[in-house]
Amino acid sequence: MLDKNLILQHIQEPEKITMLRHILDLPEIASRNYTVTASDFLDPYEQRLVQSILHHFPDVDAHFYPEGERERKIIVFSPPFVETSEEVVAFKFQPKEEVSHREVLGSIVSIGIERSKIGDIVIEDGVYVFAKREIANFIALTLTKIRHQPVKGELIPVDDVPVPEEPWLKNTAVVQSMRIDAVVRAVTHFSRDDIRGKLAKGFIKINFKSIKKAHEEVKPGDLLSVRGFGRIAVFDDIAVTKKGKVRFTYGTL
C-alpha cells in the first residue's frame, strides 16, 4: 500500500492535501476493481498538483478531461484496455437577456450543487455549462432559472462548447517592485490593510495558488485573482524606468 503521507509531503496547503488524499484512492480503486474512476473538477493549480503524483500509478492510464483549452478539468483513471465512459456532459441554456458568469454560477449553487461538480462556464451565443455526468439529470430538472429568467438546459456534445477569447482590458502601472502586494495595490487601489488581510486569508492567488507572503514575486505571464476584484493578467512587457521603478502592462476582465 502506498504511503500517502510520503507522497504528499511536498504539499503545504491542508485543503489541497485533503483533496489529493481523495484522489489517491481513485487509481487504487480503478486497478483493484478493474473499473473507471474520476475526480471532481480541478482548477489548473490542482491539476498541476495531481500531475506531480501520477508517476506513483504506472498500472493505470490517467488523462484530464475535457481536452483542449479548458480551465477546469477532471482526472480520469482507467486500467489498460478498459474503455472510458464520458464522465463530463455539457449543457446549453438560452436566457433572453444577457447574464454574467457570476449570475450563472450563483443560480447553480443556489439549487444545492457543489462548485466542484461544475466545470467551465462559457458565455457566448448562449450559456454553456460543463458538469459531472452524475448530476446531469438533476441539472436538467432543477436549473430552470438564471437571474430570474426561465431557462431550459439542452444537452450538447462537449466538443460543441465554444472556447471563448477573454476580453482583457489593457492598462499599465508603475511599482517599486513586482511584489504581489505592490502589484495588487497598483491595479486594484485597495488599501495596504485590505491587501494584507486578503493575503492572510488566502484570497489572492497566482496561477490559482493561494499566496500568503507579501514579498512573493509576480512574473510575466502570471494570472492573478483577487477576491472582491477579479482576475489580473500580467503581460510580458515589463520594463525598468530611469528612476529604477518597474512599469508593467496588465489586463483585467
Image (spheres, rainbow, N blue to C red):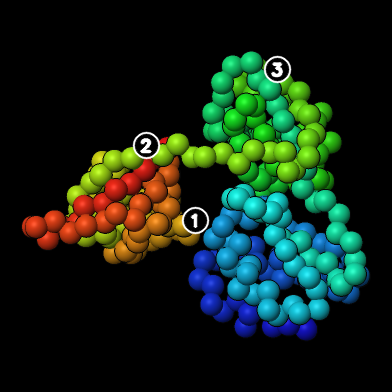
Indicate the position of residue 53 as horizontal and vertical percent values: 64, 75
Is residue 221 placed above or below 91 in the rendered structure?
Answer: below
> Can see residue 226?
no
Is label 2 in a helix, a strand or a loop? strand
The Cα atoms of the two marked residues, 3 and 1, are separated by 33 Å
Q: Which of the 4 image quarters holds residue 124?
A: top right
Q: Residue at x 60, y 22 (%)?
A: 147
Pointer 2 residue: 169
Question: Which amino acid, mark 2?
Answer: Leu
Could you tell whether 8 is left or right of 89 in the image?
Answer: left
Residue annotated with mark 1: 208
| Residue farthest to the left, as pictured | 243
Say which residue label 3 marks: 150
Answer few, some or many: residues within 10 Å of disc 2's Cα (few below 14, many 20 plus, some between 14 and 19).
Answer: few
Which dot, 2 or 3, sits closer to the camera?
2
Give the total number of marks visible in the rendering.
3
Query: Residue 15, image x and y in percent?
Result: 57, 62
Q: Are marks 3 and 1 in contact (CB under 8 Å)?
A: no
Q: Nearer the viewer, mark 2 or mark 1?
A: 2
Q: Against 6, is 231 above or below?
A: above
What type is the residue that disc 3 sits on?
Pro
Label 2 – label 1 distance at C-alpha: 20 Å
**x and y percentages locating residue 245 in the rendered image:** 15, 57
